[in-house]
Image: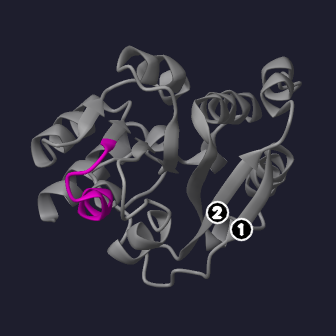
Amino acid sequence: MPRDALLFIGQFMRSPALVGAVAPSSRRLARAATATVPESGDPVVVELGPGTGPFTAVIQERLGGRGVHLAIEINKPMAERLAQRFPRCDVISADAVLLPELLAERGLSAADVVVSGLPWAAFSPELQRRLLNAIIRSMAPTGVFTTFAYLHALPLATARRFRRLLESVFEEVVCSRTVWRNIPPAFVYHARRPRAGAGEALAGTRDAS
């Protein structure tokens, strides 16, 4: 959608570290990232960093009016646009590190699926750990965390560090096939079963750099 693309580019120019990409994700990547959203029952689905909503649209389609869908977007113009487009989605303009508190405020005990569009490679090690700590504190025991990474960023130290961090936090981290029909090409991480003591380790470690 041209209006969304213009909004996305404009917000990237204002805050490139927070937006993290120059174009919205493709529908192919959105389908890969949201494949773990159940097609039955009433799941609690949390979306972090939805931007202009490419993942949001597919999540809404998969839910079909079932369950609960929270979308947490720190960028206010994007959050306002998202709320207009998806009235069935509970759009919250807030920091994703507040996820446990935001769930509690709505009487929700845990999320069954957490789908992230956050630019992890642009974050400091400490912020990565704070966000992951908030996520695992908010996940149901059988929940799944999904995020994506750009193929060209794989050799970067920040990307390698994030992959190691994921594997230290979750017992299972599975990569999807490369989604070539995205700008730039990307792949998806599906992470399950937080390791025992992962939350305490994340909360007790600080970035030394």
Q: Who's the residue at 81% across and 50% down the image?
A: 161
- x, y (%) of residue 130? 68, 27
In the image, what residue type sits under mark 1? Val
Residue farthest front in this picture: 41
Q: Quadrant of the C terminus?
A: top right
Q: Quadrant of the N terminus?
A: bottom left
Magenta region? 57-68
User: Would you place residue 27 above or below residue 129 in this image?
Assistant: below
**Label number found at residue 189:** 2
User: Would you place residue 64 above or below residue 106 in this image?
Assistant: below
Q: Residues within 10 Å of mark 2 (few under 14, many from 20)?
A: many
- The secondary structure type at the circle numbered 2 is strand
Horizontal side, residue 152 vs residue 95: left or right:
right
Is residue 60 located in the magenta-colored stretch of the structure?
Answer: yes
**Label number found at residue 174:** 1
In the image, 150 versus 93, the foreground residue is 93
Q: Who's the residue at 37% across and 65% down the image?
A: 39
- x, y (%) of residue 93? 32, 26
